[in-house]
Amino acid sequence: MKCSKCGREAIIFQRYSGLHLCEMHFNRDVEQKARRAIRKNKWIVNGDRIAVALSGGKDSSAVLYFMSKLLKDRPDVDLCAINIDEGIAGYRYPEKAKKIADSLDVPFHSTSFSEEYGITLDRIVELFGDRLSCTYCGILRRTLMNRFARNLGMTKIAFGMNLDDEAQSVMLNVLRGDERGLITKKNPHPMMVPRIKPFIHVPERDAALYAFIHTEDFDLEGCPYSYNALRNDVRGLIDDYTSRHPSTKHSIVKLGEKLPELCETNGKGLRICPECGEACGDICRTCQIIREVKKAGSGDSHPDSCI
Ligand code: SF4
């Protein structure tokens, strides 16, 4: 097929836009979507120090490539990559992420559950089983990512979430009845480093192709615990509906962007945990998990009671 814009050989057909695009127009399309999202949300300002959360997978590698290209002529904005090693054997390799950051000449920093919490996710699964692996992992990683970036003096954390991921996150919050998750994204608590998602309007398929074009050596392995993620069910549900209504993901993401604006929560409802000093809800779930893990590790087991 020929590119709908210039007649060159097309490399992708975007069902939602009805366009065939050649490599040049495809790159332009992805980068325009990312630049527009950054401009609209005022995600980058003079003096920013931005950490890209780099897992070593395709999505975060693609965003790191884009950010390094975008900021190469912005001496007023610092960029680095940060990596969290959850301790999942055969899946998480910080050295692979470092190689990607090095290839783009971006400084790299890494920490781990083991260094910070004294436990790996594999050990947590041994203690409690794998049913809630993603819940434990998500809570502990979110807290550690925020603390690590804040201690490095970062003003923003950029995530590799694409349109599909974001639509799933909005829907997950709806299904869990998590109203705070739906409305507090825009103005987090001062202890929380603001999160930015440059690829929020780029569909997963487009983000993957962009990664294949521009980066190499990224990790294609899936997490061994991912079969447990509720996200998988939600992905199936949204993909199925989108096959009949192509703009569904865009609509869900738009809803997720509008709700915080309407509610103007400004981080209200969060408090500082007296134990770990991080912003949390009524209960600090990170400290709760660590307490339960320590009890279980010492033989006094209380599986499931903390989640
Ligand atoms: Fe963690 Fe679940 Fe993601 Fe694996 S799939 S890295 S356990 S959140």
Image (cartoon, rainbow, N blue to C red):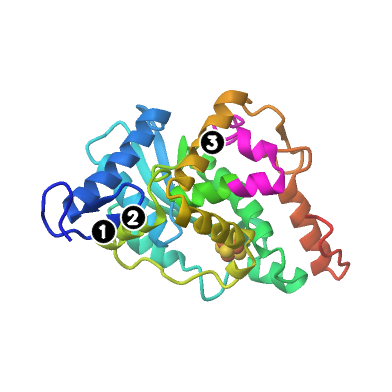
The front one of 45 and 291 is 45
Q: What residue type is labelled 1?
A: Ile
Task: Please give the name of the residue rendered at 67% of the width and 61% of the height, measured from the top-left corner.
Answer: 118
Residue 154 seen from this side: no
Q: Is residue 45 visible?
A: yes
Q: Quadrant of residue 279?
A: top right
The three-letter code of the residue at mark 3 reads Leu
* Kind of element beneath mark 2: helix
| Magenta residue check for 208 | no
Q: Are marks 3 and 2 in contact (CB under 8 Å)?
A: no
Whether tag 1 and tag 2 are in contact, CB under 8 A, the answer is yes
Q: Mark 1 points at which residue?
A: 12
Percent coordinates x, y for residue 25 in the rendering: 19, 48
Q: Which of marks 3 and 1 is nearer the N terminus?
A: 1
Where does label 3 land, which residue? 255
The three-letter code of the residue at mark 2 reads Asp
Residue at 23% across / 51% down in the picture?
26
Quarter holding ligand 1: bottom right
Residue indicated by mark 2: 206
